[in-house]
Structures are given as structure tokens and as C-alpha cells.
Amino acid sequence: MTSDNGSATPGSSTITQDDIEAKFREIKGDIDTTADSAKSMAVTVGAVVGVVVVIAAFWFGSRRGKKKTTIVEVRRF
């Protein structure tokens, strides 16, 4: 039963420091698991983006090289 101000009555179960520490450890474990998963996903995405950038640079560079190719004709008399 609670009193008028919302606090628990003295006979009810109380939350101990051990309960709080256990809950923090549980939350920390969940956060660590999520962070590891996100980190591995970020590394994978970064690698894919890097490969795409290298391929795009090569492709655009080779196209530009074909457009500006100069043909030199040498004639001998």
C-alpha cells in the first residue's frame, strides 16, 4: 500500500544496491552486444563504400582519358 505522496510503506519490499548494480550490468551487457553488432556493420559498409569509390574513380578516369586522347601522326618524307 502507498501513502498519499506515492512512496512505499515501510513494510514493503525495498530496492537494494545489489538490485541496482545487477540491472546496470544487464543493461551494459545489452549495450555492449548492440555496439559490437553496429561496429561490425559499420566496418562492412565502410569497406563496400571504399571499393565502390575506387571502381568509380577508375571508371571515370578511363572515360576521361578516352575523350582526351591525342593522336600524333608522324610523316617521313
Image (cartoon, rainbow, N blue to C red):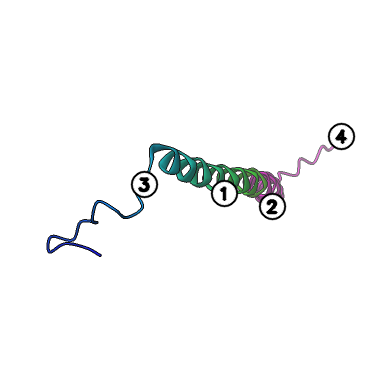
Up-down relation of residue 50 to residue 2 (above or below): above
- Residue with the mark numbered 3: 15
The location of residue 57, given as percent across then percent down, is: 65, 46
Give the label on residue 34, or none. Answer: 1
Disc 4 marks a residue whose amino acid type is: Arg
Q: Dominant secondary structure of the magenta stretch?
A: helix
Crowdedness of circle 1 by 10 Å Cα count: few (<14), some, many (20+)? few
The location of residue 43, given as percent across then percent down, is: 64, 43
- Chain part drawn in magenta: 47-75
- Residue with the mark numbered 2: 63
Q: Is residue 65 visible?
A: no
Up-down relation of residue 8 to residue 23 (above or below): below
Q: Earlier in the sequence, mark 3 or mark 2?
A: 3
Element on which disc 4 rests: loop
Q: Earlier in the sequence, mark 1 or mark 2?
A: 1
Q: Is residue 53 highlighted in magenta?
A: yes
- Residue with the mark numbered 4: 76
Element on which disc 1 rests: helix
Q: Nearer the viewer, residue 7 or 70?
A: 7
Compared across the picture, whether 64 is left or right of 21 comes to right
Q: Nearer the viewer, residue 75 or 63?
A: 63
Q: Earlier in the sequence, mark 3 or mark 4?
A: 3
